[in-house]
Image: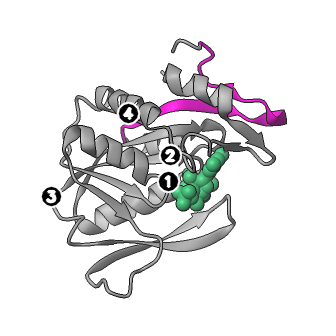
Amino acid sequence: MITCFGALKERILKDGKCLEGGILKVDGFINHQIDPDLLEQMSVEFIRRFADVKFNKILTIEASGIAPAVMLGFLLHLPVVFAKKKKPSTMDNMLTTTVYSFTKNRTYDVCCSRNFLCRGDKVLFIDDFLANGNAAKGIIDLVQQAGAELAGMGFLIEKSFQHGGDYLRSQGIKVESLAVIDSLDNCRISFADDSIAC
Ligand code: G4P
């Protein structure tokens, strides 16, 4: 069953903006200006949803995943690692993969040091958006290369009409999304679960 987190859903309806091409702008509270109180509430909801899963590390990808991942790591006192989109010249011992961005119509490299994503780690991946799931697929590749284990994937907003979530769930991954949007057609925001209290 798909359930949405009421506080985020209400905020999306209040401050989210629909752009052409199925893009939802949430830069007033998630990915440019950030609302820390909402971020804390969302992290508490992730803690509730992943309560039955064991993990020792939180993994995310720069840039917009970092804030929600750090808030969760702060509350759980766990380290947070973010995959980088540019290989730093000072880093060796890197895991790398290539991700195709549907939104930007280009590929980019994603990398992470083997020192911070290690064999035996059990990681929870956190990101702001799940759309086509290409970033998530890249992360799965990095986790596999490291010999680590993926405990689950948590997203603030899933756009279910782009089907990344279908793929991840079909792989047996525990995926939790706090707000699931099933359509942005005609610039109208439609949630998968239509009850505001969900
Ligand atoms: P995918 O990873 O799920 O396949 O997504 P896609 O390639 O379509 O998206 C690429 C980037 O666009 C990702 O951020 C993703 O979070 C973001 N994105 C996707 N749909 C939306 C949307 O409706 N609204 C907003 N605001 N962003 C969206 P990124 O390029 O990695 O950017 P950032 O994390 O550096 O901000």
**Residue at x 30%, y 63% (from the top left corner):** 144
Residues packed near mark 3 inside 10 Å, few (<14), some (14 to 19) or many (20 plus): few
Residue at 30%, 83% in the rendered image: 91
Say whether mark 2 is within 8 Å of ligand 1: yes
The answer to whether marks 2 and 1 mark residues whose Cβ atoms lie closer than 8 Å is yes
Give the residues in magenta: 173-195
Q: Amino acid under label 1?
A: Ser
Q: Which amino acid does label 3 sit on?
A: Gly
Residue situated in front as seen by the camera: 146 or 23: 23
Tag 4, which secondary structure? helix
Mark 3 near ligand 1 (CB under 8 Å)?
no
Among numbered discs 4 and 3, the one appearing first in the sequence: 4
Mark toward the viewer: 1 or 4:
4
Q: How crowded is mark 4: few (under 14 residues within 10 Å), some or many (20 or more)?
A: some
Q: Identify the disc placed on residue 147.
A: none
Q: Residue 89 sits in which quadrant?
A: bottom left
Residue drawn at the location 42% of the way across and 49% of the way down: 67
In the picture of the structure, the residue carrying the numbered disc 2 is 128
Q: Is residue 104 above or below residue 179?
A: below
Residue 100 picture location, percent across and down: 58, 66
Q: Earlier in the sequence, mark 2 or mark 4?
A: 4
Tag 1 secondary structure: loop
Measure the alpha-carbon separation of dots 2 and 3. 26 Å
Q: Is mark 3 on a helix, strand or loop?
A: loop
Q: Taking the image as drawn, is residue 3 in sight?
A: no
Label 3 sits on residue: 120
Amino acid type shown at disc 2: Asp
